[in-house]
Image (cartoon, helix red, strand yellow):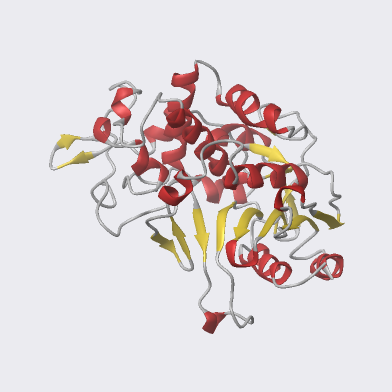
Amino acid sequence: MYQSALNKLVDNRKVHGVSVAVCRLTTSNSSAAEPWIGAAGNLTSTTPFFIASTTKLMITAVLRQLRREGRLGFDDPIGQYLGAELLRDLMIIDGTQQALSLMIRQLMSHTSGLPDYFQRKVAGKSLQDELFAGSDRSWTLEDVLERSRGVRPAFRPGQAGRAEYSDTNYQLLGRIVEVMEGAPIAEVLQRRLFEPLGMTSTYMYADPSDARPMTLYYKQSPLRIPKAMTSFGPDGGVVSTSSDMMIFLRAFFGDALAPTEDLDELTRHWNRIWFPFTYGTGIMRFRLPRIFSPFQAPPELIGHSGLSGAFAFYAPAKRTFITGTVNQLAYPDTSFRLMLKLVNERS
């Protein structure tokens, strides 16, 4: 059933390739449950692909580890780790600069009010517009912050019930991790996550000449933007496979990376970012109302997705993990339709 669903999805118009891993836990020995892994189209089960914003879940994992080690707190002000010059004019409220007082938790939960550097329009165009048009370019954290300086915040940091998804938040979190670890974020992820978990096909994309990952697709055409992919870093620059992502996802929801008790804190408060998504502390939730679903009881999915069509979610009601990609930027609903179908089916 799983493979048939993948085969049907590939139409060489909206979807040119799909790769998926599904793991259903059993009550007898959940830790030993083996995932089903499949692919179709121009992807194989071992083809590396860009996971885009699913990278954010990995940054959350590292922050959990650092907190467990007593090296930072989620309520720490970011000015404790980042310099005043870097944060200059980034959050001006009532004529005063307040960026230094932003909390790590507010960046993780997208409740900081900082604008999204990727989708914010400057001179009528956003970085997303430029990239989708095929104009590749690179940028630095300093470039990211320049696009946000002096911009009026969407709301006051931590304002009740308010959240706005912003890649800028995770660019800053990545720099905080680098300051704490004294190493580039690529090295930190390799040392803290990929090597210990045996994720041998996962790495941070850093070389524009690296042709290993499958090229992204925008509608029917390949979209080659290697310079941009080296720039996303902590907000979306990791390359992986479905099987490696499955290893990470199960570790994230288990106790291999950090205490499972803090998962309750990550998922205690949800704020809407856009229908039907809400965001906790460093983690995303997809929950489709029954009226919009072909399934009698659409399951709640907790984890993260990426603009590339990548996904890594856990469905608690089904005790099922699902990871993979449809490798398509233009039709974001495709991956979620596939996930719901597979979570509600048997292999």
Q: Is residue 189 visible?
A: yes
Give the percent coordinates (x, y) of residue 218.
68, 55
Give the percent coordinates (x, y) of residue 290.
53, 81
Position of 171 relative to 24 (above/below): above
Position of 118 relative to 200 (above/below): below
**Residue at x-position 35% and y-position 55%:** 163
**Residue at x-position 55% and y-position 66%:** 300
Going by the picture, which residue comes out furthest to the left?
94
In the image, is 322 to the left or to the right of 86? Answer: right
Position of 50 relative to 322 (above/below): above
Going by the picture, which residue comes out furthest to the front?
28
**Residue at x-position 77% and y-position 32%:** 200
- The quarter in which the C terminus is drawn is bottom right
In the image, is 91 to the left or to the right of 47? Answer: left
The number of numbered discs placed on residues in the rendered structure image is: 0
- The quarter in which the N terminus is drawn is bottom right
Position of 199 relative to 282 (above/below): above
Q: Is residue 122 visible?
A: no
* Rendered image quadrant of residue 339: bottom right
**Residue at x-position 80% and y-position 35%:** 212
Which of 218 and 174 lies nearest the eye of the viewer?
A: 174
* Rendered image quadrant of residue 70: top left
Give the percent coordinates (x, y) of residue 71.
41, 23
Going by the picture, which residue comes out furthest to the top?
182
Which of 134 and 36 lies nearest the eye of the viewer?
A: 36
